[in-house]
Image (tube, rainbow, N blue to C red):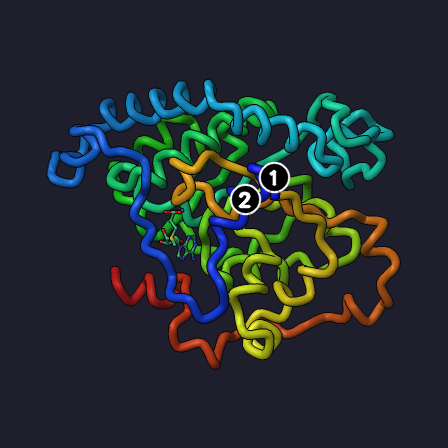
């Protein structure tokens, strides 16, 4: 097995194996350890994020992510008759043909976590900022939401010029333009809701998901339950194209099980029309332990 493949295997959890704690393997600096107790300091948090970006910039795996993303047909520039943003992505770019990025490309990030107190979330945020830079997506065209963000964290995100969503969409965002969805280590329902909302042959190719490998989720979930509770995720495994995004062993807890997931239009067009029949909104009636925070729960807490 190649070194790369080995790293990938290590990250996987088998069905029935208890979930590993998300405690990061990255070594904590004294500042990190103290940051929960400190009063929130916007400038210090911004500084740490920028330092983390500089650290990642020097990593080989970052270059690998960048190359994969820039050569993905879903994010590459598509010819558009009016010279504006493409309505649909192209599917004819060769792997490795790093070109310009699609104009009007947007980004949505759910489930980042508390990046001022959690090192993994800070690394993930720094990585997202690098991706925005590489894809030439202006930060204001990147919408972020996590119900756990504190007021201070929202301020930091605004300082970074990112757009902070004020409503819990539960992932049900209708995509109208090519969009990167950055969902690191998020609950299955968030992916399933996103897929449900965009479950159309012409719309799915607009989505590029950077998140948990769908085939990894399938491996770790009992088939019957995946089909019953997360039907769109279950179906998407066969429709999508997944490319693993590797990371060094010391950052496994931050970036493990991550893949670049796209929906090649050619694949979707071969499916029978009934695949796209209007489907009921997922309700998760059999999921007492749903891994996401729903709108009503959030309202109940505030
Ligand atoms: C397993 S944690 C992952 C956190 C971080 N990305 C990491 O890898 O350490 C899942 C995250 O999803 C967030 N989340 C839950 N419901 C959500 C929702 N409706 N919309 C966006 N994020 C949500 C949680 O608050 C939590 O931060």
Q: Are marks 1 and 2 in contact (CB under 8 Å)?
A: yes
Left or right, 96 with reference to 120: right
Residue 200 on image: x %, y %: 74, 58
**Front-most of residues 190 and 241:** 241
Mark 2 residue's CB less than 8 Å from ligand 1: no
Which of the 4 quarters of the picture holds residue 135? top right
Residue position marked by numbered label 1 in the rendering: 2
Q: Residue at x 26, y 28 (%)?
A: 45
Label 1, secondary structure: give it: loop
Q: Residue at x 80, y 25 (%)?
A: 83
Residue 42 on image: x %, y %: 24, 28
Residue 273: give its label: none
Mark 1 residue's CB less than 8 Å from ligand 1: no
How packed mark 2 is, by other alpha carbons closer than 10 Å (few <14, some 14-19, many 20 or more), is few
Residue 238 on image: x %, y %: 72, 61
Left or right, 167 with reference to 239: left
Label 2, secondary structure: give it: helix
Q: Residue at x 61, y 44 (%)?
A: 1
**Front-most of residues 138 and 286:** 286
Left or right, 224 with reference to 251: right
Residue 6: give its label: 2
Above or below, 155 relative to 10: above
Above or below, 234 relative to 137: below
Above or below, 159 relative to 226: above
The quadrant of the rendering that contains the C terminus is bottom left
**Front-most of residues 234 and 1:** 1
Task: Count all numbered tags in the image, as a single digit.
Answer: 2
Q: Residue at x 51, y 35 (%)?
A: 142
Left or right, 236 with reference to 301: right
How packed mark 1 is, by other alpha carbons closer than 10 Å (few <14, some 14-19, many 20 or more), is few
Residues at marks 1 and 2, CA–CA distance in whole angstroms? 6 Å
Residue 35 on image: x %, y %: 17, 35
């Amino acid at each position: 097995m190649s070194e790369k493949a080995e790293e990938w295997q290590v990250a996987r959890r088998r069905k029935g194996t208890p979930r590993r704690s998300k405690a990061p393997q990255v070594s904590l600096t004294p500042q990190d350890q103290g940051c929960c107790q400190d009063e929130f300091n916007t400038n210090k948090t911004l500084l740490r994020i920028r330092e983390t970006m500089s650290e990642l910039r020097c990593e080989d795996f970052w270059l690998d992510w960048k190359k994969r993303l820039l050569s993905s047909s879903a994010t590459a520039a598509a010819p558009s008759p009016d010279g504006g943003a493409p309505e649909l992505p192209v599917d004819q770019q060769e792997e490795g043909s790093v070109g310009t990025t699609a104009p009007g490309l947007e980004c949505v990030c759910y489930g980042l976590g508390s990046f001022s107190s959690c090192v993994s979330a800070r690394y993930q945020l720094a990585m997202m900022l690098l991706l925005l830079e590489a894809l030439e997506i202006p930060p204001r065209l990147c919408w972020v939401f996590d119900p756990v963000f504190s007021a201070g964290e929202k301020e930091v995100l605004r300082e970074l010029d990112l757009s902070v969503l004020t409503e819990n969409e539960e992932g049900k965002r209708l995509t109208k333009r090519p969009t990167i969805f950055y969902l690191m280590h998020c609950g299955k329902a968030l992916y399933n809701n996103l897929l449900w909302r965009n479950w159309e042959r012409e719309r799915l190719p607009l989505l590029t998901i950077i998140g948990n490998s769908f085939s990894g989720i399938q491996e770790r979930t009992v088939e019957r339950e995946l089909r019953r509770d997360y039907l769109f995720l279950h179906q998407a495994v066969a429709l999508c194209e997944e490319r693993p995004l590797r990371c060094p062993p010391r950052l496994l807890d931050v970036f493990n099980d991550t893949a670049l997931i796209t929906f090649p239009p050619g694949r979707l067009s071969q499916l029978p029309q009934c695949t796209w029949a209007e489907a009921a909104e997922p309700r998760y009636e059999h999921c007492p332990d749903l891994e996401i925070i729903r709108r009503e729960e959030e309202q109940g807490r505030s």
